[in-house]
Amino acid sequence: MSEMEKLAAKMEQQIIEEKLAAELKEALIKEPIHKWMGALMRLFDDIQFWLQPLAKKGLVEFNRGFVDIDEDVPGGSSIGYKGPILQMGINRRAACIRTQGLYTKGYHGTVEFMAQSKQYLIFRLSDSDTQWFIRNRNEDSSNGVPLNEDSLAQAISHYLDPM
């Protein structure tokens, strides 16, 4: 093998290694987002299930969709994806639960719940798919309470107030 052929082989090997490294980096970025999307879909399913008593009485309407999310990933990369959004009419008033992002400082994923003049943060403190918390967005020092049917009912109870 000539020196030029050896050089060509080394260059080809370098290209292959760089391509594999890029593919691995991309997989390491996409895998947490894939898990995050699964957790979000379960969360939105749970919320709709918890609101079924209102839906059966015509007091809540749902409209699911997706919004564009762009996030900076630890390590200097960024990723764009479609995050779920749940637009609602609760007692004839607008509300919205919207994906905020996985890589939110201090949390392992956040969702915002905007309901009239009230704003809530729904968040995870760990990578758990099922353990979510909710707090008033204006109470920065609050760790919130576990998100469940009762805490969600408490968050939307202000919809009883007259218009």
Image: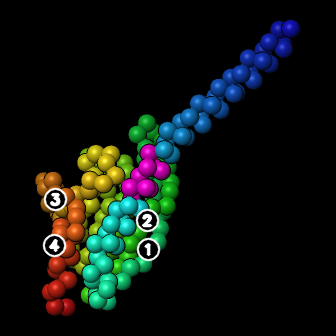
| In magenta segment, residue 35 | yes
Alpha carbon of mark 1 to alpha carbon of mark 2: how far?
7 Å
- Residue 128 appears at what percent x and percent y? 31, 48
Q: The magenta stretch spans which residues?
A: 32-40
In the rendered image, the residue lying farthest to the right is 2
Label whose residue precedes the other's in the sequence (1 or 2): 1
Q: Which residue is mark 4?
A: 154
Q: Callout 4 environment at 10 Å: few (<14), some (14 to 19), or many (20+)?
A: few
Query: Per the image, is 102 magenta?
Result: no
Tell me which colouring the rendered structure shows: rainbow
**Mark 2 and mark 4: span between their CA atoms?**
23 Å
Q: Is residue 40 left or right of residue 126?
A: right
Which residue matches tag 1? 64
Q: Amino acid at mark 4?
A: Gln
Q: Secondary structure at mark 1?
A: strand
Q: Main secondary structure of the magenta part?
A: helix
Q: Residue at x 31, y 69 (%)?
A: 47
Q: CA distance from mark 3 to mark 1?
A: 25 Å
CA gap, disc 2 and disc 3: 23 Å
Quadrant the C terminus occupies: bottom left
**Neighbour tally class for label 1: few under 14, some 14-19, many 20 plus, Cα within 10 Å:** few
